[in-house]
Amino acid sequence: MNVKHIIRAVLFDLDGVVVFTDKYHYLAWKRLADEQGWQFDEKLNHQLRGIPRMPALQIILDHNRVTIDEAEKESLATRKNDYYKQMIESINDDDLYPGVVPFIEKLRAQGVRIGLCSSSKNAQTVLDKLGLTRLFDTVVTGHDFRNAKPDPEIFLLGAERLGVPAFHCLVFEDAFSGIEAALAARMKAVGVGSRDVLPNAPEVIARYDEIDVDTLLDAGRPSRLPTEPWTIAQTQINPARSQYWESLLALTNGFMGLRGTYEEDDPALAEFAYPGMFLNGIYDYEPYHHVVSFPGYPQRRHVMLNICDWRIINLIVDGERFSMFSGKLSDYRRELDMHRGIVTRTFVWESPSGKRVRIRTTRLVSMVRRHSAVIRYEVAPLNFDGVIELESVIKGKARSGELKNDCIEIIEQGTASDACYFVNRPKTADSRVAMAFIHRLNSAGRPSQTAMEECSGQFIERFTIQAAKNSIVVLDKFACFHTSVETPLWDLLPTAVSGVIADINDGFETLLREQTDFWSRYWNVADIEIDGNVADQQAVRFAMYHLRQSNPEDEHRSISACGMTGDHYWGHVFWDTEMYISPHFVYTQPETVRPLLMYRYHLLDRARERAREMGGIGALYSWNSISGEECGVVYEAATAEYHLVSDIAYAIRRYVSATNDTEFLYRYGAEILFETARFLADRGKFIPARDNKFCINVVCGPDEYGCGINNNCYTNMLAQWHFRYACRVHDEMRQSKPAEFAELAGRIHLTPEEYRLWQRAADNMYVPWCESLGIHAQDDSFLYLDPVDMSKLPLFTDLRNHTHPLNLWRMQVAKQADVVLLMLVLGGQFTPEQKRANYEYYEPRTNHGSSLSSSIHSVAASEVGRPEDAYIYFRHSALMDINDFKDNTAGGVHSACLGGTWMAVVNGFAGMRDYEEGLFFDPHLPAAWESCRFKLRYRGRLIGVEVRREKATYRLLDGESVDFTAAGRTIRLSPQNPTASSSVR
């Protein structure tokens, strides 16, 4: 499948984009207006850009307050067109937009389809006169459509003629209405001209030669971020991309998340920004309104709340309020320093009156003090002595973008020990939040004044400093949050206040040093070093950074689909945590995985309740939830994904295998294993028509396009493994911990008959297999569905949003890795030939509508000898958020995709597998890399792995001797002989 580039077609407007015909339109309208005695100038002409002739004429008439009948309008519009056609007789190459022709030729050389989409009915004439028709595969003019921009019809028609789905099209436009039309068509859009006239454009260019073609085709963006190994840097201001940057630069620690919104409360950013302060485990409810409701339907959902907005610090310089959009801004840079876990922002601002200040902000959300965060704001006057005012605003509650109503109320507000505080509660959930804030001003001994203003719902503290030239004014703003999830109600507010006072007493530098030390320790064991490609190095570290800061290390909290970077997916926990996110931690910091599994244990009673709601026994975990209460209203692709319970069982096995933590297994894990096996054994049945094989019917596998299907291969084979593992743990625990086993069996009423049922179900599990194709059938029906021309479907797009279910369910297309994922999870049960055949069948039939898909296809492609596929899919995963492939990073980063990126490197390129038989490596190196190095924690050992073009080297860095298989041969590392090597593919 052609997945190399996201963009397959580029559509150009004509006027002001390919050629400058504006002057000819202006002169034609001007001549007509002068004849009629109407006012017409270049300012009015600008309003006509991208608008067909008749609507343009109406704008001129309205401006001049002229009313005429339709016949006269037609006559005048025709006359203007005649004038225009006369004038373009003199058009020549000097009227071409500089660089546009070589740019289009570069695109064509990459196999990109090119279209021209112009409202002008004379567009073809212009192309012919300039000899440009050869550059375009299709031309859409004003003759071809009815609805003018901003209606998307013109661009949708262009995409249809090119045979390219809208998702894979990009539009170059110079008019506000044209950008609106492109976005309405769900296409990528790049403005041509200036940001001032195109505030709605996601990206704006002034010159075609400044475009990075590879980035344009990869992500629909004209330039990539600065490629730096340890930082993610913003060097240009684009209000329309504010929320994208807020997610990328969000600072979290698993307990709390602070989005990367600018410090100032600037009206120019209000419509674009979404400030967010989230606390893991704090949510509110809203009801579902079912037209028809059945037993087991969730009646309400809960959503992670945006708690408050405390990041605001406004600057006033000698009476002039700072805004990035007034005065002059220079040396601008905002960056996420992944090595230290901080975000800094530095620039010089010249006020409208000419006063220059250097500003630097630093913010951190502490990974050591999980309840604490701080922002430092520094101001230095550069060319004057004068008054610096800093206005710190704390809003006690904020809007939650995923909820319709105001869902938080402030129940207490006040001051104590120089700190200000709020106590909040959700309106329908039984929880509380206490938050306290305190400031420290360092004005280098200069005179200063402080004033506190308290009003309902907010505090404003103002600091006024008489600052000397080149002095530095420093304001530190500390915050501390506690919730009733972890803190008793009676101690909630005192704990928050005492916490923030302890922070200010220790000081900013102490918190910064703790943060730096924490991240240094993490990178020492978890870093993946890549030589040869800085962009890949940056992307992999970005993935690992956001993974690590999302882990709460708290057994009452887990990692949601976006971590704490945004509230897309409502802050819910999915199967992503067990299958995509936790592998990274199992093999780098396994001690942080046990709390993630304990989170599931604490929800076991909720899972039992959910099983009963669904008419079952045992335990059925909710598909998407925070509290364990099911919120997945699309039951056919939520509750029906029974594989979730086996995913959790698999995560338990992986953790125990890598750590030998049998204390956890017998005390907590076994109960989860037994109760979830109980549910599956009850849900499936022995079917006579299938030779009494054990079948699990009416399910949904990882491919969420296939709903209500029977015998999903992933579900059945993982359930088979689940039953066998539950039986093994049953036997081992009964033998080694008989008292504990007896207590557990008695408490959950586990019977020998159930144990025998699990054995029988495992031994007789129905596994879909197609002998003629030599592949594992995804389910009983997938191979028999309607064939699909995949070139007509958009990739990386969830088709459920565009297709009626009755049509989608007929199509032989997979949303994401299903059988292909199974080949990683239970890889030891597949032959190499089966893996290759499965990949070659399912890969071309997958549209990767989920961000979870690319990484697993990268791993599979590595294993079956498709290195180019492996690298392309790796980059789709690694750059998912940096390049904003799916146009939804604004809602938060894709946590599972981040974990999948680690898997693509370690499981894919290094070929690491942790099977029942032991540890395996089968390494190869992407052509774009010179080497790759990483470390793995495995059963108390620390193993260093280095893959180079000519060989792979393994080093025992800590721990006892270890045996594993690499490139087909057995290797032993010991303290006496700590180094060995293997071949690479």
Image (cartoon, rainbow, N blue to C red):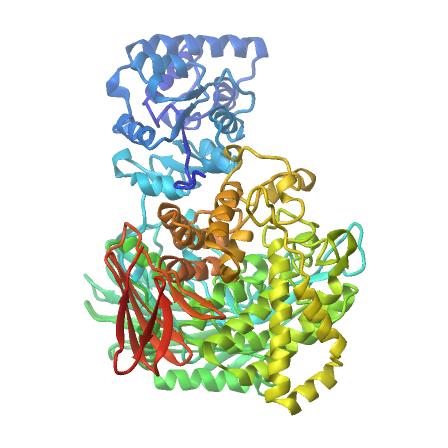
Q: Is residue 309 above or below residue 413?
A: above
Report the front residue among 287 and 630: 630
* Residue closest to the far bottom: 739
Report the front residue among 543 and 283: 543
Looking at the rendered image, the quarter that the N terminus falls into is top left
Q: Which residue is painted at 46% across and 26% down in the image? A: 162
Q: Whole-percent x and y of residue 109? A: 31, 30
Q: Quadrant of residue 614?
A: bottom right
Viewer can see residue 644: no
Q: Whole-percent x and y of residue 399? A: 57, 61
Q: How many marks?
A: 0
Whether residue 476 sits left or right of residue 286 in the image: it is left
Q: Which residue is painted at 24% across and 66% down in the image? A: 380
Q: Whole-percent x and y of residue 557? A: 56, 74
Viewer can see residue 98: yes
Whether residue 417 sits left or right of residue 732 in the image: it is left
Q: Is residue 155 above or below residue 372?
A: above
Q: Whole-percent x and y of residue 590? A: 45, 76
Report the front residue among 562 and 191: 562
Q: Which residue is painted at 69% across and 67% down in the image? A: 620
Report the front residue among 558 and 709: 709
Q: Is residue 206 above or below residue 697?
A: above
Looking at the rendered image, the quarter that the C terminus falls into is bottom left
Q: Quadrant of residue 400?
A: bottom right
